[in-house]
Image (cartoon, rainbow, N blue to C red):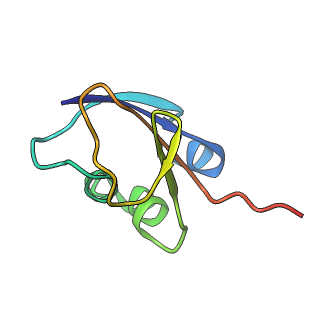
């Protein structure tokens, strides 16, 4: 299964990625599992995706939670929560 990933705001700056195409292992079917796989890339990845920062996700431009299912060809975006004031 192949997806396109997008990283925004602080994630983009810290991870030094804005977008990437990724071939997912067969057992990666949810946002949470995807975060877990990406977190294994190293300390910064783990801190950003599985640490205290509450990373939001969207699939094909719709906000989703960590249980959302990823399908072949989806566009998945990660971004930190937005606060306003």
Quarter where residue 49 is shown: bottom left
Residue that protrudes farthest toward the bottom in the picture: 52
Q: Residue at x 35, y 30 (%)?
A: 74
- The location of residue 65, given as percent across then percent down, is 43, 59
Residue that protrudes farthest toward the right in the picture: 85
- The location of residue 37, given as percent across then percent down, is 25, 53
- The location of residue 35, given as percent across then percent down, is 34, 55
Nearest the eye: 44 or 72: 72
Q: Residue at x 45, y 71 (%)?
A: 51
Q: Which quadrant would the N terminus be assigned to in this image? A: top left
Q: Residue at x 45, y 66 (%)?
A: 47
Residue 74 horizontal side relative to residue 15, left or right: left
Residue 53 position (above or below residue 73)? below
Residue 40 position (above or below residue 29)? below
Quarter where residue 26 is shown: top left
Nearest the eye: 69 or 46: 69
Residue 1 horizontal side relative to residue 51, left or right: left
Q: Which quadrant would the C terminus be assigned to in this image? A: bottom right
Residue that protrudes farthest toward the left in the picture: 26
Residue 79 horizontal side relative to residue 76, left or right: right
């Amino acid at each position: 299964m192949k997806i396109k990933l997008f990283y925004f705001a602080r994630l983009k700056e810290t991870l030094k990625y804005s977008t990437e195409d990724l071939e997912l292992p067969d057992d990666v079917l949810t946002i949470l599992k995807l975060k877990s796989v990406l977190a294994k890339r190293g300390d910064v990845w783990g801190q950003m995706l599985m640490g205290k920062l509450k990373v939001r996700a969207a699939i094909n431009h719709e906000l989703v939670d960590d249980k959302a299912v990823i399908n072949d060809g989806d566009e998945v975006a990660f971004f930190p929560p937005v606060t306003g004031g």
